[in-house]
Image (spheres, grey):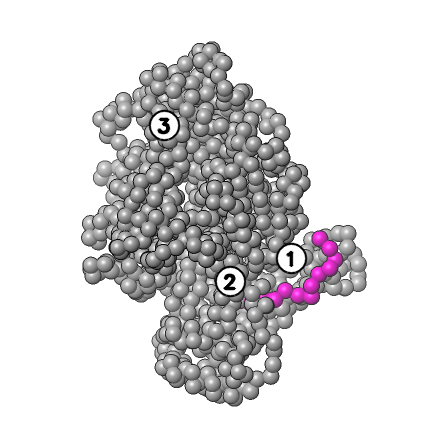
Amino acid sequence: MTAKHGPSWRLRPGAARTTSRTATAVVQGRQGARARAEPIGGGPTAASRGRACDGDRGQRAFRPGCLEREPVAALARFVRRRASGAGDLPQHLADDVDLVGRALVGRVVGMRGGEAERNGDGRWRSMANERLYDSKMLLGALYRSELAQSLARLGYGIEKTHADGRFEIAGVDRAVVEAFSTRRAEIEAAVAERGGGNTADNQRLAQRAALMTRAGKRDVDRGALRASWQRQAAALGFDAPALVAEAAGKSAAAARDAVPDLPAAPDRPPASGALRQVELPFDGLAPTPGRASAPEPSPPSPAAAAVEWAVAHLSEREAVFARTDLLAAALAYSPGAAAVGDIERAVAARETAGSLHAARLPGAEGLLTTDRAVADERETITLMRAGEGRGATPMRARAVDKALRGGLLTAGQKEAVKLILASNDRTVGVQGYAGSGKTTMLRRARGLLEKKGYMVRGLAPSASAARILEGEAGIGSETLQRFLARYAGVAEGRMTRKGEKDMRAQFAKTALVVDEGSLASTVQARNLLRIADALRIPRVVLVGDAKQLDAVDAGKPFAQLQKAGLKTAIMNEIMRQRDPALKEAVEASLAGDIARAFDTLGDNIEAVKRDNLAGAAAARWLALSAEERANAGLMAPSHGLRERINEIVRERLVRDGTVHGPAMTLERLVSRGYTGAEKTLAANYMPGDTVAFHRPYKRLGVEKGDELRVAGVDRGTRTVNLEGADGRAVAWEPNRIAARAGGVEIYRSEEIELRAGDRIRWTRNDAGLGLVNSGTAEVAAVRDGKVTFRLEDGRTLDLAPGDPQLRHLDRAWASTVHAFQGRTVDTVIAAMEANHPHLTTQKSFYVEISRARDRAELVTDDRAALKEWLEAATGERIAALEAVEPETEPARAPKALDRDLGL
């Protein structure tokens, strides 16, 4: 950190485009209407400006040589403009209708309290405020919420358009919005050209693109500008004065009838606890016959409903989350339904009641966890410990040593095989670092178990990983999710005595092997151990690498169980890397020695301009020979960057004839990635989306596998109107079933062109066709109205337009780092942003370079900044128990089979 600071930060809130258009219509169409326009199209509100400049919320005064944490007073200036300044159009058409506001927050602070008293000088000092940037999502949500409340009071209808709480004013046609959004189109085009994907996915690049494409300021004839806007609006059939007048009438009527200012939440979730259908709790208690039903609880307040929903949404993916993220999510739940003060009081009430807990871990200020997350982690540890001494012992340790004598296994592999065969604990672990030979070890363990009459069954977090486990280790495998769904009744305690007896007999001599164990969530690990305990499965083997990426969903049970005393064998002899320097870099990354890893990789780390990350990564891959490409991995941290790399690669391959011949354009489905809580909100469904049902629902007349398109959304009744390809209509209330785990998936649509030579990956399983999610194929031909694919196993497959599987594919030259985990190639080429707050971590760096046998190349936008960032960003998650009980968390030293890493 240095004393060289810029003069200010600029806060530009993301207002709805319809608000600025409508506000400008008020100004141009009604004299003296400025007061009415301010709450429609203005910038940061008083409360959001106060949040940004509140000196008690994290600002720090900076002086050379020291960093002060004292109460401060910040300077801020609010400015407003009425035109967007788009493009190189003639002056009279150069500005879109756009009444927007910005806040300039000075990077200087005035000391208050102890600092001022000590110095008595009242001087202003430079301010370092990383928290202002960290809180940008909350500030945006707060601004939109207050704007929505103002609009509601003025009589305007609100239509939520994005899951993050963005909205538009009802009654403004989309064609009008797009016609007056040339500036936005410029920015989006610039971001796409530079490989940034969607502007929402790459806000830093969007900001840079805005600066690069912004026209110079100039004097504008306001009268001519207004006349131009009016002509354009008239041509589009947009009557802004009528919309304004209608809103004014509604506002006046509301005032006369004394209707409360704030509307009820249009998407209130079910009664408290119903969202837990995502994973049903099990307390071992059956319903008591004859017990009178409890009285129907009163509906929660808008703020309480918003907080309940936000907790369910955040806790699905993270056991510990930021208080600011909780507030932002609650504000986005139903824009304008509750004020931030009411939401903060609802959060405080949950803390008082014990369903939310503030983190007590040093350095984790401002973080929260839930009582559910704490209970799940405790139960998982308890179940592991309950199995100690209760597993079978297929072989004695000496017999295993004898069987392995003279073999080619490493010491770590032998240790792991002996633990699996000779331990008397039900659950054991194998911590195997990348390239240490886990598959070879499992193949040897399987052979010995089968000789003793045991059935070995494999479980993996994805269908592709299960296929690899089956193909390379010879262990019949399926996905962990499918196994847990099949035995969900066991995990929930819903078994008859006969069913329990039959299933215990079925598993009496079974060893379950869970590969890629670090990718299992806490809920999955808990349910697995519940099943193992109830059915008395003699052996559960958790195999993975706690140093690699964690599960998408909450928790890190593989690492947490090891810390809590899970008997674990350590496999640390890395054999994958054939290049000594690359092996040294991998070992350095494991030890957290980023400086040594960078020094060892040397010129293999290339710095390019930020907007050329995709192009530089693609160019390195394209420079390889066809044979080298087949054995190379091309990785990106985000989906947006991956998509841009794929676009660049394909453009080049089309030019050189590798991708050739007739083309077929198809509509493919892209998952929106919603959490269970997000799926319950009708407002999150957009016309044109596709809802795929993974279970039958007789009441709706929907079968498993049905894919219905969203025709529209009734926000008043919280109903999503669906239509099938056959014309049938289904009115669906998503808050009734959408939160159930695996019940539905929501997709958006986009076009994809296929030609011979294209390389694709499947994005869903199809057991009938023998296809697995993440499996790849090459387009062999496009002819006679069909696409012929050459699959990985050598088969060919013909699919015609209309086949559902053709909607579930993507380009496959580049992959995300998370999807590439578990694979091995000769060469790795990876793009990595220098300081991405979520995706640039030691874990992702380790996964990237450890996939390669011979060479790992890294493309970044700033080598020095990347090194500095990685040294601090470990990527380690905080468990719920670590957060609330940092000193008393159930933990025991791992048992004697642990050995030092030896790096």
Whole-angstrom CA distance, mark 2 to mark 1, is: 32 Å
In magenta segment, residue 5: yes
| Badge 3 or badge 1: first in the primary sequence | 1
Looking at the rendering, in which quadrant would you find the C terminus?
top right
Most foreground residue, 612 or 518: 612
User: Which mark, by number, is residue 475?
Assistant: 3
State the residue lying farthest toward the front. Answer: 657
Give residue 15's position: percent from left, percent from top: 49, 69
Most foreground residue, 293 or 526: 526
Residue corresponding to mark 2: 193
Question: Residue at (43%, 54%) from the top-left corner?
Answer: 657
Evaluate whether residue 294 shows in this view: no
Left or right of residue 676, residue 885 in this image: right
| Badge 2 or badge 3: first in the primary sequence | 2
Evaluate whether residue 174 shows in this view: yes
Badge 2 local density, few (<14 within 10 Å), some, or many (20+)?
A: some
Instruction: Identify which amino acid the numbered label 2 is placed on.
Output: Glu
Please, is residue 715 above or below residue 771 in the view? Answer: below
| Badge 2 or badge 1: first in the primary sequence | 1
Give residue 118's position: percent from left, percent from top: 78, 56
Tell me which corner region of the image, top left, top right, bottom left or bottom right, holds residue 488. top left
Badge 3 local density, few (<14 within 10 Å), some, or many (20+)?
A: many
Please, is residue 782 above or below residue 12 in the view? Answer: above
Instruction: Identify which amino acid the numbered label 1 is placed on.
Output: Asn
User: Which mark, by number, is residue 129?
Assistant: 1
Instruction: Give the magenta part as a residue range.
Output: 1-12
Most foreground residue, 775 or 237: 775
Secondary structure of the residue carrying tag 2 is helix
Question: Residue at (69%, 66%) from the top-left corner?
Answer: 7
